Image (cartoon, rainbow, N blue to C red):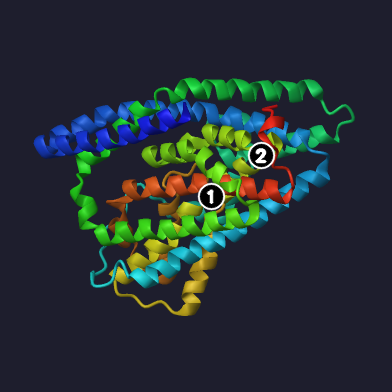
Amino acid sequence: MHRALTLMFVAAMLLGVAAGWACNHYLTPDQAIAVAANLAIVTDAFLRLIKMIIAPLVFSSLVAAIARMQGIAEIGRVGLKAMAWFIAASCISLTVGMLMAHWLQPGSGLGLAPSEASAAGVDAAKFTLQDFVAHLVPRSIFEALAGNEILQIVIFSIFVGTAITALDDKAPQVVAFAEQVTRIMLKVTDYVMKTAPLAIFAALAATVSVQGIGIVVTYAKFVIGFYLSLGVLWVTLIAALLLIVGRPAMRLLAGIREPVVLAFATASSEAAYPRTLEALIKFGIPPRVASFVLPLGYSFNLDGAMMYCTFATLFIVQAYAVQLSITQQITMFGLMMLTTKGLAGVPRAALVVIAATLPYFNLPESGLLLVLAVDQFLDMGRSATNVLGNSIAAAVVAKWEKRIESLATLELS
């Protein structure tokens, strides 16, 4: 079943690119834009369907996961192990982006002059400490649920789950209710996923019809360099997974194939969240570990986005022939390590980080325009990598906890 759906995803991608090319080639620019606008309705509807699932699924699964744990000590232990992996993976991702940018030199030779133009829709002002704290703590859980603020939902869920473990009777009715909501949301996911191939087709057809395949050729050195860098990151993360988890890791990689393809095709790691959670549980990771680590990962472990931040920023540096010292690059590394945390739900999070970073090093803000043109194609790779990285994180933490179960003992609840 899953293999057939994956094949449908791939077929939808190929047909979407072909349809988009035909529209771009045979229609006038205005007609192509009109077609893309109509196709975008399908994609928006699908992503809205997915987003309506995420908030209740994250809340119910995380509360139930924490409530199943054996007290605050286990919650703290699992949380610390998860954060340790997130920090390690973040360092690896940022380092790969920097090293590959230096090796490939994707922006060298462009010799651009600074421009006063700005990148519309990318707001670097989100990075004040006040705004970060405000984004971290919800004013109202209902507001957080309505806005799909994953980090705020995670914070509230951790408080609720921890309070349940501290009660003498463990609030069994509340836990049972949370578990039932999780089951219902996963069943709703099955219904929504039946429309995924259509959404994938519409998303790619809309993008290619307006921008055309040619834009990838124009930015070939940058795009190819980025995906080559992603390949290096994938190999590094998978090697770490094999080293820690062992041979069963190959079964995990096969199990997350569908959510990875879905994230790639829709350029949305959120779209793959429900299926990723299911795949982790089917692999043998206990629900309380998978449901605890995965939401945290979506807030603190955006491996693909982090690698893109350093790679794209150095591309801009090279395009304007700016020289950064080792000290400045180390400062950039630390700045991005901090600013990439807690950005779940922020549109174009990687671009926002880059926009906030450029002024720190007196780089022209108009440099962001260089990467905006192909950002949709690059966001596909970033989203798929985020799903892979968070799946690996859950498996590693489960292994450290010695909690990877056999399929024979696996239960959803």
Q: Quadrant of residue 135?
A: top right
Left/right placement of residue 312 relative to residue 237 reads left
From the viewer's perspective, tell me whether residue 409 is left or right of residue 322: right
Q: Residue visible at 24% across and 72% down?
A: 109
Residue 278 horizontal/vertical position (percent) = 58, 32
Which residue occupies the foreground of this view, 241 or 343?
A: 241
Q: What is the x, y in percent for residue 94?
A: 49, 63
Task: Tell me the SS state at disc 2.
Answer: loop
Residue type beneath disc 2 = Ile
Q: Pointer 1: residues within 10 angstroms few (<14), some, or many (20+)?
A: many
Element type where label 1 sits in the image: helix
- At 51% from the left edge and 47% from the top edge, which residue is drawn? 388
Task: State the separation of the CA atoms marked 2 and 1.
Answer: 15 Å
| Residue 285: image tag | 2
Residue 142, visible in the rendered structure: yes
Earlier in the chain: of badge 2 and badge 1, it is: 2
- In this view, 275 is above or below 342: above
Closer to us: mark 2 or mark 1? 2
Q: Classify residue 154 by image quadrant.
A: top right
When the figure is inspected, residue 92 is found, relative to residue 293, above or below; the finding is below
Give the percent coordinates (x, y) of residue 49. Answer: 45, 25
Contact between labelled residues 1 and 2, with CB atoms less than 8 Å apart = no
Q: Which residue is mark 1?
A: 389
Q: Is residue 228 left or right of residue 208?
A: right
Q: Residue at x 48, y 57 (%)?
A: 235
Q: Amino acid at mark 1?
A: Gly
